[in-house]
Image (cartoon, grey):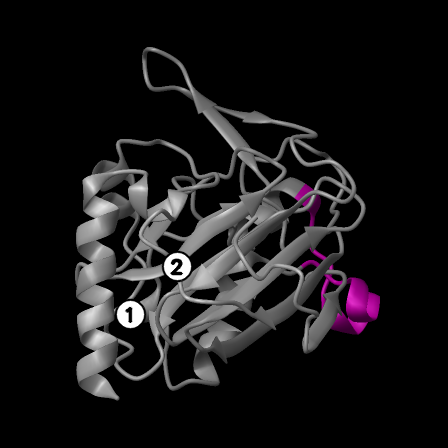
Amino acid sequence: MSAGSSNEAFYSVQLTGAGMWSKVIGRGKTLRIEDLEGGANVGMLLYNAYEKQERYNMPDTLKGQQIFFLRSPYCLHSDMGRLFSSITMDTCGWHDTVCGFSDASGVEKKFGSKNYQEAGNHWHRNGRDCFLTELGKWDLGERDLVPNLNWFSKVTADNKGNLKFVPENSKPGDSLELRMEMDTLVVLNTCSHPMDPSVDYENHPVKLSVRNTPVPTSKDPCLLCCPENQRAYQNTVDYNNLRF
């Protein structure tokens, strides 16, 4: 865990059902996400809070760190050569970043149709529509959808490139922490992973909390993970210093 992690959270909220959430989190703050019951999936998109055409870039995040999945101490890269955040703590150990999000047709085909008029808050929502609902609050929309993160979900690949979802990857109480390296618009939902084989429509509650954290030192493991992280972090420092 990063230095200063003992600071108490000044913000917290619990998301239940197919919960949606979006906020700007400033640099120097850490977002903690906790899987309360196990089996959660948290789809996430990231954007520059001031220049929203800059967003999380899956290819750069993976190729720069020579990885297929995320865990601590990896970082999340933008499409402008900067860092949105660093994964400073992670008890789960494997998070999917290649499989995207569910959509309305896929959910209906898998679970059947159940709308709000029929089921109230238990209606069948999907990741795409939840993302678009939150993005609309920030004057963003369809064209701003990019490959997303799926926290707590594990998907493996064999030698032929076939993907396999691994159930029960996340246990009750598993959590991760993202230290924001720049002011970032965070958009997320708790809809199930599109490859989850469960025949029941389920969404698991998560707790979000935010606290203040100090800037990383020269020995920070996230930045030392690979040279690309160090270069991207310096680009981020320059951006922040020139902007403010």
Q: Residue at x 61, y 70 (%)?
A: 210
Q: Which mark is residue 216?
A: 2
Residue 180 belongs to the span the image colors magenta: no
Q: Nearer the viewer, residue 173 or 6?
A: 6
Q: Is residue 190 visible?
A: no
Q: Position of residue 70 (x, y in %)?
A: 44, 39
Relative height, residue 140 to residue 8 (above, below):
below
Count of numbered tags = 2
| Mark 1 burial class by Cα count in 10 Å: few <14, some 14-19, many 20+ | few
Q: Is residue 147 visible?
A: yes
Q: In the rendered image, which quarter is residue 235 located in?
A: bottom left
Q: Is residue 63 left or right of residue 33?
A: left
Residue hosting label 1: 143
Q: Position of residue 92 (x, y in %)?
A: 61, 36
Task: Specify the amino acid type for callout 1.
Answer: Arg
Question: Counting residues from the N terminus, which is met first, the one under dot 1 or under dot 2?
Answer: 1
Q: Nearer the viewer, residue 147 or 244?
A: 244
Q: In the rendered image, which quarter is residue 153 located in?
A: top right
- Do the residues under discs 1 and 2 have CB atoms within 8 angstroms? no
Relative height, residue 61 to residue 114 (above, below):
above
Secondary element at image label 2: loop
Give the CA separation, mark 1 to mark 2.
34 Å
Segment tinted magenta in the rendering: 111-124
Q: Residue at x 69, y 58 (%)?
A: 124
Q: Position of residue 71 (x, y in %)?
A: 48, 38
